[in-house]
Image: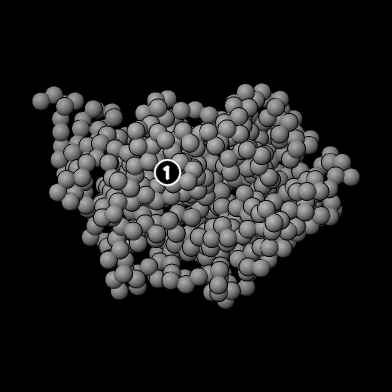
Amino acid sequence: MTKSNKVKKKNTDVVLIGAGIMSATLGVMLKELDPELTIEVFERMDIAAAESSDAWNNAGTGHSAFCELNYTPELEDGSISTEKAVKIAESFEISKQFWAYLVQNNRVKLPESWIQPIPHMSFVWGKKNVNYLKKRYDALQQNHLFQGMEYTEDAAKLSEWIPLIMAGRDDSEKLAATRMDIGTDVNFGALTRCMFNHLKTLPGVTVNFNHEVRDLTQKDECWHIKVKELASGDKRKLKANFVFIGAGGGSLPLLLKSGIPEGKGFGGFPVSGQWLRCTNPEIIEKHYAKVYGKAPVGSPPMSVPHLDTRIIKGKKELLFGPYAGFTTKFLKNGSVLDLPLSIKAANLVPMLAAGIKNIPLTKYLIDQVRQSPEDRLEALQEFFPEAKLEDWELEVAGQRVQVIKKDPVEGGILEFGTEVVSAKDGSIAALLGASPGASTVVAIMINLLGLCFKERLQSPEWQEKLKTMIPSYGRMLADDPQLLDEMRNWTSEVLGLKTAEYAQ
């Protein structure tokens, strides 16, 4: 038998496909809940978090609904819906609790390398948008998750908050902004790698880079998985009791290969992204905030424009975008055949129906692809009027695959959130979608545990452990101001996020 045809066999309790923030979080949680579990991780790339979780691939912020306007849509009657914003804000607080637990118990180190305090701001111009932002602010003030948010239309105050954005503006322009000082910047790439560094030290855990899962089939109550080592061509077969597909844009093809009835009818629509990255240190130093505006009509939520301070490898960076684009790849390092090969008989109708109903989105993406550097600069100058092209360079961001699912009325609908698709027997689950993604990862994984480990989750041992890892587990932060204050004080202290409001 030649080396390229060599087949190795092995059994394990859990297989995690993809070495991003989702698999890292689930792997760490499962080993905390049951240290005896054996886990195999398979990743196509040579390092963890090389795709969607990387700081340059869009997942470089802590989405907590403080500033993202697409989470608070204006309804037909003129009111503001805050339901999604409240859910996301609470989910992010749950993530911070789990991270604080990991730091406090020496599971991960150096929180300053992956999380920083940074103001989250919304900024709009024009009478209609200013009226919307004021209504949004008033609506969010009804929930204590947003306590401490400030609102202003005062030009002097705005110049103090965002001098870069205010310089060179017309004095007659109607402007408004909100600000939350307890916002954060999270480098999910760095956090993911910290978590995998911990996982690799644990007995029963094997992390395999440069390995691609080629097929998975359920037989005899086990999943039979075929894996190829990309460098050598060696092939492996293994059996697992549970499989999690957390491969970002690569999750959909593997879900379809699994053949589970719950996955039939799902499709995906890939959207690529680009950033303008500032190369002028003087400009970078003049801005310290995540400032979000309103998305153009017809654009996907992931394309909400923002001027974004990020800390990457200890260095302050300034980005503007993202600019959307279209490619048939499901991963940044994927294949142009990803989209056509994902079209099956079961999802053809939903994909066609969703496509017909989202023609404005298609037009928007085509227009984005055709943009010149001058066009991109014009969009930036709406935020930063004095921006010059020579101070910015184009940076390619990551791929997002928006979920297309069956709908009994519409035939197929395009979803912009994240969705866990699991088999009825709980033996396999896949995570599809994009925003808000990484920031709500812990809440997503708790939901997954309820779907796939239902009996064990209800055991006294797992319940007690979950309350240790996430002290608010089983209670609603959105309904309990005192509990929220306690949790924010604790996580801010452990993660080094103290602001004046929460300093003792």
Q: Nearer the viewer, residue 304 or 195?
A: 304
Tell me what residue is drawn at x 50 percent, y 48 percent: 417
Rendered view: 204 above or below 472: above
Tell me what residue is drawn at x 44 percent, y 46 percent: 408
The residue identified by callout 1 is 406
Q: Nearer the viewer, residue 278 or 270?
A: 270
94 sits left or right of 18 in the view: right
Tell me what residue is drawn at x 55 percent, y 72 percent: 479
Please state, as top left, top right, bottom left or bottom right, where the N terminus lies in the image.
top left
Please state, as top left, top right, bottom left or bottom right, where the C terminus lies in the image.
bottom right
Q: Nearer the viewer, residue 122 or 136?
A: 136
Tag 1: residue type?
Lys
- Residue 453 seen in this snapshot: yes
Question: Quarter-wise, where is residue 335 in the image?
Answer: top left
Q: Please, which residue is most extreme toward the right here?
A: 172
Q: Please, which residue is most extreme toward the left here?
A: 1
Q: Residues within 10 Å of mark 1 (few under 14, many from 20)?
A: many
Rendered view: 37 above or below 368: below
Q: Please, which residue is most extreme toward the bottom here?
A: 482
Picture coordinates of residue 104, whole percent (x, y): 44, 65
Rendered view: 475 above or below 286: below
